[in-house]
Image (cartoon, grey):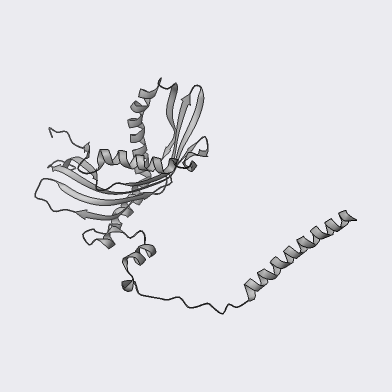
Amino acid sequence: MALMSSLLGILGFGVGICGGLLVGFFLFIYREPNEVQDPVVRPLYELDTAALEEILPEIPMWVKNPDYDRVDWLNKFILQMWPYLNKAVCLRIRSMAQPIFEKYIGTFRIEEIEFEALSLGTLPPTVSGLKVYDTNEQELVMDPVFRWAGNPNIILTLKLLSLRLKIQLVDLQIFAALRVTLKPLVPTFPCFASIAISLMEKPHVDFGMKIMGGDIMAIPGLYHYVQETIKKQVARLYLWPQTLELPILDAST
């Protein structure tokens, strides 16, 4: 008898819960609220800076600063060229990374390092503004604002003590304000001998990293530490007045 009473009590509780949820659902759908007010509509010029930042957190540089030009034509060019730029850049990365990988072979019991997959994805970077300076020197100076929220497929395979570890880089985002200097200008195509690149401020770099399928960035504290370390190291190497020099023509040309 006690068992039957318990079963009936549980059954009644379940029916009551279901019935209450059903009644609440219909009341929520069909009951007309009487406290709803029309939203306040204000023109943009009446909003203060804080309100504008909340509404438009990613305002292009050409909107915020009249010295910067809108370069939709350049972004269209990059979009059309991206499949070819992607392959060219990846080949360059492989050739540059190979000597670095070879230095670590044999250390820390590392037997092999190689790219299992290397692609920058289908989403190209965009230039949200470009400023060109007028100078009297034999050089061309411009400040592009560079944004890239890509979908790269980068998998690095590390063979350690006969165990193969796969390290995958995902959801890469880079926001950076650059200074690009073409110097010196010469009468030989492409009309400049080298490219000097500097960062005008610390870049925003965000990405996810998986090891054997597990997201290590989910470890508390590690994400913030990695982000800050990358910002400091990149800024130490390339933050203005430090530069990255890329020779284009031979010095004797």
- The residue at the point 24 percent across, 61 percent down is 65
Residue 110 spot, x, y in % from top left: 44, 23
Q: Nearer the viewer, residue 213 or 196?
A: 213
Residue 180 spot, x, y in % from top left: 22, 46
Q: Is residue 250 above or below residue 1?
A: above
Name the outermost residue toward the left: 136
Q: Nearer the viewer, residue 231 or 113?
A: 231
Residue 20 spot, x, y in % from top left: 71, 67
Name the outermost residue toward the top: 106
| Residue 201 visible within the image | yes
| Residue 120 visible within the image | no
Residue 134 spot, x, y in % from top left: 13, 53
Name the outermost residue toward the bottom: 34
Is 252 placed left or right of 127 in the picture?
left
Q: Which image quarter: residue 10?
A: bottom right
Is 248 placed left or right of 171 in the picture?
left
Tally the numbered discs.
0
The N terminus lies in quadrant: bottom right
- The residue at the point 31 percent across, 52 percent down is 77
- The residue at the point 36 percent across, 32 percent down is 94
Is 157 placed left or right of 194 in the picture?
right
Q: Nearer the viewer, residue 228 or 184?
A: 228
- The residue at the point 19 percent across, 45 percent down is 181
The C terminus lies in quadrant: top left
Name the outermost residue toward the front: 2
